[in-house]
Image (cartoon, grey):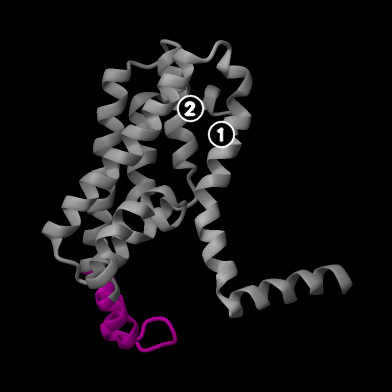
């Protein structure tokens, strides 16, 4: 995916839509938000985008997307648990979600911004877990600022500071992707059941 060609084509509104979708709509979990923000910031340093318009749009898209995700979880997600009993849609899981966000919800909303996929589902689960909205929106704004503004401005400043930085853009984006997914991979590997399942799957593929 050549973002340096795609982003100028879709423009500022397209970037806003992607950031919004990845921040809280279930359809946006596959979108590469970190890479898009960084590349958009870099393109702004090259005069393709106006940084004074780009940054506020990304920030608003991130905060608004999370807020919509919260409402989706609160209005529709809880009904799945209350009406349907299954391995996943179980009332006990709802109770655990409520307890988790009561204890860890604040830092989760901020840290999830920097983890792909988790970034999309965190506000929805916050809504399902009935996290207090005033608490949610406060940390939503903080997280949205650090992620949307921080990553975009990183691309902008690097574009201005490093000569011919476009030659290194792909390796930089690759590093961003690795850093952003590493917490999720680390969490999976720490869980013995998940680690054993992965090992069994790999062995099955290699020695079948």
Give the Cα distance between marks 1 and 2: 8 Å
Place of residue 41 in the rendered image (x, y in percent of width and height, measured from the top left): 41, 24
Chief SS of the magenta region: helix
**Picture layout, residue 48 above or below residue 111:** above
Check disc 1 and report the residue beneath it: 173
Which quarter of the picture shows residue 98? bottom left
Q: Which is more N-terminal, label 2 or label 1?
A: 2
Disc 1 is placed on an element classified as: helix
**Picture layout, residue 155 above or below residue 36:** above
Q: Is residue 190 magenta?
A: no
Going by the picture, which residue comes out furthest to the right? 207
**Picture layout, residue 13 above or below residue 84:** above
Point out which mark residue 32 bears. Answer: none
Q: Is residue 188 left or right of residue 84?
A: right
Point out which mark residue 39 bears. Answer: 2
Q: Residue at x 44, y 86 (%)?
A: 87
Q: Is residue 2 left or right of residue 77?
A: right
Disc count in the image? 2
Place of residue 175 in the rendered image (x, y in percent of width and height, measured from the top left): 58, 38
């Amino acid at each position: 995916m050549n973002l340096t060609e795609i982003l100028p084509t879709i423009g500022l509104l397209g970037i806003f839509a992607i950031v919004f979708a990845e921040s809280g709509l279930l359809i946006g979990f596959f979108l590469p938000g970190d890479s898009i923000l960084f590349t958009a910031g870099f393109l702004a340093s090259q005069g393709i985008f106006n940084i004074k318009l780009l940054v506020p749009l990304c920030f608003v898209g991130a905060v608004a997307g999370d807020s919509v995700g919260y409402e989706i979880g609160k209005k529709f997600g809880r009904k799945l648990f209350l009406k349907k009993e299954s391995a996943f849609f179980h009332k006990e899981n709802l109770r655990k979600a409520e307890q988790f966000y009561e204890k860890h919800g604040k830092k989760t909303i901020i840290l999830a911004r920097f983890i792909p996929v988790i970034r999309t589902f965190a506000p929805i689960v916050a809504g399902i877990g009935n996290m207090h909205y005033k608490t949610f929106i406060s940390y939503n704004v903080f997280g949205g600022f650090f992620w949307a503004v921080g990553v975009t401005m990183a691309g902008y400043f690097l574009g201005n500071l490093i000569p011919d930085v476009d030659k290194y853009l792909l390796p930089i984006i690759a590093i961003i992707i690795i850093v952003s997914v590493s917490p999720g991979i680390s969490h999976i590997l720490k869980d013995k059941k998940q680690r054993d399942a992965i090992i069994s799957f790999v062995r099955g593929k290699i020695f079948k």
